[in-house]
Amino acid sequence: MGLERISAVMQGVHDNYDIDTFKALIAASESLTGVPAEGDTRASHRVIADHLRSTSFLLADGVLPSNEGRGYVLRRIMRRAMRHGAAAAARATR
């Protein structure tokens, strides 16, 4: 069992994104983008939260954005999170 799943069981929730760690990241994403995590933008906020977590682990491990190896993976993760942030903001303005 992974850390998120154990946290979900301990906190009595059925979804990994409802644990306190992800709730805080999603709330930060909502406040920075100005878009609530409802409807079409819910998935984007979840992607942003998950990718922020992944990025922080990679950076803590000493990985820096680069053109090869783990650095390239970090760049792709960061870009995808930024793309979802922009998409969520664009959907909210419609």
Image (tube, helix red, strand yellow):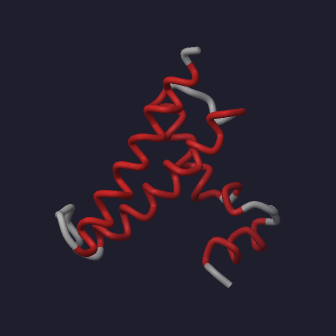
Towards the viewer: 70 or 26: 70
Whether residue 94 is situated above or below residue 63 in the rendered picture: above
Q: Quadrant of residue 91?
A: top right
Pinpoint residue 53: horizontal percent, then vertical percent: 45, 61
Number of labels in the image equals 0
Q: Residue at the spot x=50%, y=31% of the render?
A: 31
Towards the viewer: 8 or 91: 91
Q: Residue at the spot x=50%, y=39% of the render?
A: 29
Left/right placement of residue 25 relative to residue 18 reads left
Furthest residue in direction front, as rendered: 68
Quarter holding the C terminus is top right
Towards the viewer: 90 or 30: 90
Q: Residue at the spot x=63%, y=71% of the render?
A: 4
Q: Quadrant of residue 41?
A: top right
Pinpoint residue 72: horizontal percent, then vertical percent: 26, 65
Whether residue 35 is situated above or below residue 84 in the rendered picture: above
Pinpoint residue 36: horizontal percent, then vertical percent: 62, 30
Quarter holding the N terminus is bottom right
Left/right placement of residue 77 relative to residue 75 reads right
Furthest residue in direction bottom, as rendered: 1
Pinpoint residue 17: horizontal percent, then vertical percent: 67, 56
Q: Residue at the spot x=76%, y=66% of the render?
A: 11
